[in-house]
Amino acid sequence: MAQKFLYIVNHYVPYPDSNGGLWNVVAEDDNECFDLIVAEDANNFYESYYNQLKENILNGIVYELAGEVESCIVESFLD
């Protein structure tokens, strides 16, 4: 199994939608982290903010994990 990382990503969609928050995601890399978060946006409602999400992932906090861990969204704190 590939090395995994814990990503802590701040992603908030501004007014008038005012949605989003903090994402804790286990992923192999930045791309998988992005894909997991986007998968939660089933109707692509926030698609216009995906470029900002990519930047937020690159600027987020990342911790290397020990052991074998499945990729997933661990928790999200959303408004």
Image: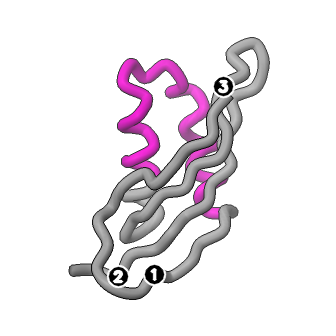
Position above or below: 46 against 25: above
Most extreme residue toward the bottom, as rendered? 66
SS label for mark 1: loop
Quadrant for the C terminus in the image:
top right
- Image marks 2 and 3: residues in contact by CB distance under 8 Å: no
36 in the magenta segment: yes
| Mark number, residue 65 | 1
Estimate the spatial distance between the alpha carbons at disc 1 and disc 3, rounded to whole Å: 29 Å
Estimate the spatial distance between the alpha carbons at disc 2 and disc 3, rounded to whole Å: 31 Å
Applied colour scheme: one colour
SS label for mark 2: loop
Position above or below: 19 against 9: above
Q: Nearer the viewer, mark 1 or mark 2?
A: 1
- Image marks 1 and 2: residues in contact by CB distance under 8 Å: yes
**Residue at the spot of label 2:** 3
Which quadrant of the view contains residue 13?
Answer: top right
Which quadrant of the view contains residue 65?
Answer: bottom left
Left or right of residue 14, residue 48 in this image: left
| Mark number, residue 77 | none
Mark 1 / mark 2, whichever is N-terminal: 2
